[in-house]
Amino acid sequence: MPLRSIEQVDVQSVHRARQRLLEQRNGMTNQIRGLLLDRGIAIPQGLYPLRTSVPAILEVADNGLTAAFRELLSMLLQMWRQTEVAIEHLSEQLKKLAHDNESCRRLLSIPGVGPLVATALVSAVGNASSFRHARDLSAWVGLVPRQHTTGGKPKLLGITKRGNTYLRKLFVQGARALWVWKDKRDDPLHRWMRALGARMHPHVAVCALANKLVRIAWALLRKNEAVFDHVAAATV
């Protein structure tokens, strides 16, 4: 594992706190929906319906909810809102950190890489000097396909799913967001994505794209290049 500075540890702490709050918000969301469903009130999944539907439910006086349950629901909603504010605060903090750090700014030039991915990667690996090759970093993240050889012929299987689970999830999310726009632009990277989609299942192709994003990030960090290069990226 690469050695980290105090600053890198601080940024990772922000990521861990934010991730824990996300899990907490998800648990509270499911709890509120479940409690209401037990009383015959169903609200759609998602954050927006909970923001709007629960306050509206509390305002209705004749929906059969007892005073005790209304107090409980109001308290849970207040805790949910406080968690959401805390998540937003940490997200803004990471955005500022990304724009204040030179390495992060270079990573932000890569399509599919936002402040979360940039700060998480730099806080974990620094300038990637611990990794001699792009594949080494990709393997550390857990995005390198497993290989099975039989009869002298290697066969690529699914990704190993070993390594840094958090970074892998962020890169896959970024790749999935980028994949949606694969038909909207005509540059070497997007042409590569379209060719990939023509011969692979979308889920497999997204993981392959995440792998390429990691390799591109390694090239930017190790070679100290200023910005992302579409032409060079197609060959990484």
Image: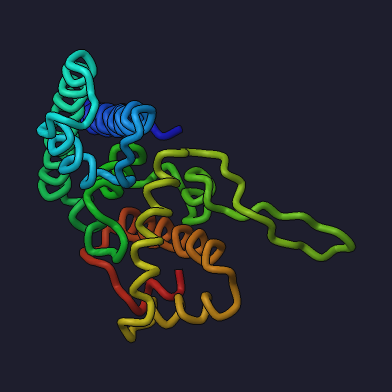
* Residue ranking furthest to the bottom: 186
Q: Residue at x 35, y 57 (%)?
A: 174
Q: How many marks?
A: 0
x and y percentages locating residue 133 in the rendered image: 49, 54
Q: Residue at x 40, y 61 (%)?
A: 176
x and y percentages locating residue 118 in the rendered image: 27, 49
Kindly tell me whether residue 125 is visible in this rendering.
yes
* Residue ranking furthest to the right: 151
Q: Quadrant of the C terminus?
A: bottom left
Please state if 176 lies on the left or on the right of 203 as rendered. Answer: left
Q: Is residue 186 above or below residue 143?
A: below
Q: Residue at x 47, y 56 (%)?
A: 134
Q: Nearer the viewer, residue 75 or 42?
A: 42
x and y percentages locating residue 84 in the rendered image: 18, 34
Q: Is residue 159 above or below residue 73?
A: below
x and y percentages locating residue 34 in the rendered image: 37, 30
The coloring applied to the image is rainbow
Q: Nearer the viewer, residue 91 or 209?
A: 91
Please state if 4 lies on the left or on the right of 84 as rendered. Answer: right
Please state if 98 lies on the left or on the right of 190 as rendered. Answer: left
Q: Is residue 142 above or below residue 12?
A: below
Location of residue 182 by image quarter: bottom left
Q: Nearer the viewer, residue 140 or 39?
A: 39
Kindly tell me whether residue 4 is visible in this rendering.
no
Please state if 73 lies on the left or on the right of 195 as rendered. Answer: left
Q: Residue at x 14, y 27 (%)?
A: 82
